[in-house]
Image (cartoon, rainbow, N blue to C red):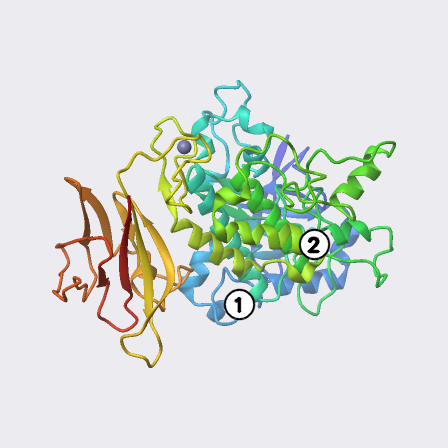
Amino acid sequence: MSEIAEAVLADGSKLQYVVTSNPPRGGMKYTYFAPDKSYVVQFFNDPKMGQDAKMRDRIAAIIGKYNPTVSEENGGAMGNTEQLAEYFADKYCWPTGIVVSPEFGIVSPAYPPKFFFDANSSLVSGLDLRGRDKKSNWFTSRNRKYLDPRELGNFMLMLKVCISLARSIRRMHAAGLAHSDLSNNNVLIDPKTGSCVVIDIDSLVVPELYPPEVAGTRGYIAPEVLATMEYPYGDPRRSLPCIETDLHSLAVLIYEFLLTRHPLNGPKHFPGMSAEEEDQRLMGSDAVFIEDPNDTSNRPDDLKVTIHDLGPYLEELFIRAFVDGLHSPKLRPTAMDWERGLLRTWDLLYPCDDPQCKAKMFVMYDADHPVCPFCGKKVSASEIVKFRLKKELRGKRGQWMQYGELVVYNNMPLFPWHVYSNIFADEKASREMQAYVVKQNGRWLLINQRIKGLRSASGDLIPPGKALLLRNNESFLLSDMPNGNLVETVMIP
Ligand SMILES: [Zn+2]
């Protein structure tokens, strides 16, 4: 049985929704869909929550002055342009309106169709997942075996998911907002396209407004929150969700996305303790990273791919998150640290030679031992080519400093952030391909697409449409325009 009802919003406008007898229910809210499913209307399980003035203020701030999916001009976050609002609108399921009648609730956009499984998603298992949302635990746990291989993406696409997530969280944190319940339930991912969307935004912790009573989700709650849950809400000894606790959850999700296992779930256990109490200790006060280099008490003996295989940037970040910062929240890497480290790692990606390899690409951090850690296949190429990216020191003409490295492969594209040292690959950067590298008849060529001022090692101008022959140990200007990088080509046999 279903019937159409009408919600009145805070601004006086009206929206229809379909009332069903058994609406989907989460921990806090239940959900009705629009007749055309383009938005959802959600009400609180406990109607008293909707009468709480502090909660109403918080939701109004989330929809208004803290909203990164609406431009400042249209009442959204400060400094937000139309273009940035559009970029972030895809990254979160941000509430769009407050319902005042028949009772207090919120309106949110529906998730884009790619975040729902379709009829082909689990053909192999015979499990019917049609219409279910793609909560990330489908992809990071044993549940993977139920999914069609096409749903699983590959290592490069999972890295893309991680960059998108780190960026979305960085944007929230930059505004002072904490998600407070970041978990595999509240992050939907589509590995096929490398995208992710952060949902359940209404439990955000907003600066200077009363925090929501959310503890978090098992496996993602920061250890200090779990270890102090015995104290009542409001007791100063109790750690509550905040930006630093989000940073624990973020690191757990990134680890799971890249290695399909949980960073704290290992063999360690406490004999004689109840399962609940033991879990509390293993994820809380006694949590140990399964790859802790000093304390191996929680290390499984069958770890095939480790953080070391993810290259130096991610290895360092995981050590900071799960060794230095596991019980010291201030030492955890920020979302910005993750975004940068993931992007630098992206530049080290290299295709695996084995056509059967599920990862397809891996991080080429050691050109002297080029082996795909996922399948064990050794690279057969006669040489590994790298670009050392150098920027000119400010005020010191002709003095260059290396600040990045790119591992080169056939058909690899170059983007504006590779060409110019003042461009960072964030939401503001243009994603227009500038040039690409090809290997033809044993020679490596850089094909200029649209770079102004690309010059060969001897200073000749290479206009768009023309190719530059790459030679070992030669340096060339990617662009002679301001902030253009100098590139040193290195070929490792
Ligand atoms: Zn491989």
Residue at 61 percent across and 66 percent down: it is 176
Question: The residue under label 2 is which amino acid type?
Answer: Phe
Give residue 264's position: percent from left, percent from top: 68, 41
Residue to which mark 2 is pinned: 104
Label 1: few (<14), some (14–19) or many (≥20) C-alpha neighbours in 10 Å = many
Nearest-to-viewer mark from 2 and 1: 1
Disc number for residue 77: 1
Residue at 33 percent across and 56 percent down: it is 431
Q: Dot 2 lies on which element?
A: loop
Residue at 58 percent across and 33 percent down: it is 303
Relative to 376, residue 54 above or below = below
Give residue 201's position: percent from left, percent from top: 61, 53
Relative to 281, residue 471 above or below = below
For the residues bearing labels 2 and 1, Cβ distance under 8 angstroms: no
First in sequence: mark 2 vs mark 1: 1
Instruction: Classify mark 2 as within 8 Å of ligand 1 or not, answering yes or no.
Output: no
> Is the N terminus in the top left, top right, bottom left or bottom right quadrant?
top right
Question: The residue under label 1 is which amino acid type?
Answer: Ala
Report whether 75 appears left or right of 424: right
Give residue 438's position: percent from left, percent from top: 21, 45
Q: Dot 1 lies on which element?
A: loop
Give residue 202's position: percent from left, percent from top: 64, 54
What distance separates the C-alpha of mark 2 from that of mark 1? 24 Å
Between 164 and 475, the one lying in front of the other is 475
